Amino acid sequence: MFNAHDPDSHRLSHGPAQPAARRKTLPSNGSRQRFRERERHIWIYRWELRSGSAVRTGTGTVRAMSAESVEGLAQLTRIGPATPAGELLRRYWFPVAVVSEVGDGPARTRLLGEDLVIFRDRKGAWGALDMACPHRGASLSFGKVVPGGIRCAYHGWSFATDGTCFSQPNLPPGREIGSVGEIAHHAAEQGGLVFVRLRSGRSPVPPVPRFDILVAEGGRRGYYSAIYHCNYLQVLENLSDPLHPSFLHSDVRKEAGAETQSASQLRYDSRVPRRARFVETPQGIKSTIITELGAGKEFLHSINFCMPGLIRSSVSDPHTPGGKEAFAQVSQWVVPIDDTTTNVLFCVHVPEGSPLPEDYLPRWKVVTKHVDDQDKDVLESLGSVVNRRAEHLVSSDDGVRLLRKVLLQQLFDSKEGKPLKGFPPAGDPGATLVFDSDDTIVQT
């Protein structure tokens, strides 16, 4: 019989109680490191055994994590505080809003399961605070930007961008609360987007990486965003599947109009044979879609995935004067709002000298919405968190497999304090992240 006051009472009794066995001590230094490595390999291998696809090397360690590891993937879908994936993602900056849409007052947003307000103070500095006022929980989204920060609409408590409470009205002198706890997160602007990095206890906090499309000078930029009612992982998997557009988005060429037709849009034509190859990179994954043009020619269209959720591609046509440099560059961020909601935020940059017409940006937004609505409908039909046990992956799903492998590896590397993908080189934190997302025609 189980005794709540005796945690061992549920165990079977086999005679008189024996003295407790001496606890084995774990040596330090090298032995401890080897123990951690064995523990890590065992953990991965358990996932492999359960998925039925374990791969082992002659040394007895796991060579690679299978893409079908359901137990491991389940950890990736849970992104709240104190979850392994949540801890990993809290090390990154995410775009949460377009600057021009925030306005003069505070704007509410939600990131990785946490409700926030973002605002720009009178000096132009961006702030991100917990939405609930630490006084009595009123939403700071009803507040007002005042000199020094933001003022709560309920009782007038005011907070700076670093979370300091600098005003508590209607209290006798000396009765103010000195500290209201940690309520501030990190916020910054780049390329017309507001980025937020949730506080995580890790320091120092790196600056927002310099994304090439956002720091490029001149030209024109356009933005688009949409909310998906599903987990972020299935959105990333969809974007790592470059062969689906020829069926799901087969009508996009007609939607785009003749003036914006390009070789890159051939990937939307289901009649044209194509294949894809995928390569892991220092920042994530490079996908190359290879479309047969006939006469011994192939068109290569590249798409880059950068941790934790950036998809980088181009709109170009090597047939035109100026070639691959002449059209536009597109970035697409997958931003986890919570376990079952995702924000997908686009930015397109049309450089100086592009042959695209002046009305390209509004037309790009129409086409982007058309394609995005099709993706959204299909992904939401899978459920808020897709049941991956029912999958039958084939060779054309290699991009999805590689994405899962990279994400799981990043999960381990984060726990072990190793360098992560998606950041500039350690020796050059101010370096611009440049992606090879050009289009090329080759003779086979």
Image (tube, helix red, strand yellow):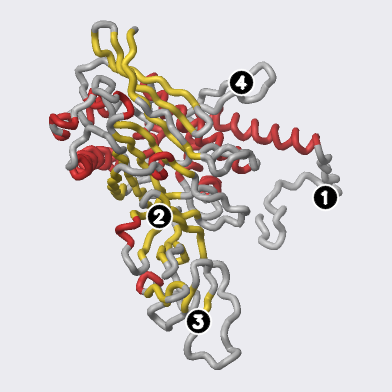
| Residue 205 point in image, percent of width and height | 58, 53
The answer to whether marks 2 and 4 mark residues whose Cβ atoms lie closer than 8 Å is no
Q: Nearer the viewer, mark 2 or mark 4?
A: 2
For the residue marked with disc 3, what is the amino acid?
Answer: Ser
Residue beneath the point at 21% across and 21% down: 270
Q: Which residue is mark 4?
A: 56
10 Å crowding of disc 4: few (<14), some (14-19), many (20+): some
Separation of marks 2 and 1 at Cα, in angstroms:
64 Å
Query: N-terminal of the two: label 1 or label 4?
Result: 1
Q: Which residue is mark 1?
A: 17
Q: Nearer the viewer, mark 4 or mark 3?
A: 3
Residue beneath the point at 51% across and 65% down: 184
- Numbered label attached to residue 392: none
- Numbered label attached to residue 194: 2
User: As rendered, which of 154 and 383 lies closer to the eye?
Assistant: 154
Residue beneath the point at 40% across and 65% down: 119
Q: Nearer the viewer, mark 1 or mark 4?
A: 4
For the residue marked with disc 2, what is the amino acid?
Answer: Val
Question: Which quadrant of the figure has residue 189?
Answer: bottom left
Question: Which residue is farthest bottom?
Answer: 172
- Numbered label attached to residue 167: 3
- Relative to 225, 93 lies left or right: right
* Dot 1: element: loop
Separation of marks 2 and 4 at Cα, in angstroms:
45 Å
Query: N-terminal of the two: label 2 or label 1?
Result: 1
| Residue 412 point in image, percent of width and height | 59, 38
* Dot 3: element: strand
- Relative to 35, 401 lies left or right: left
| Residue 43 point in image, percent of width and height | 62, 35
Q: Is residue 232 above or below residue 280?
A: below
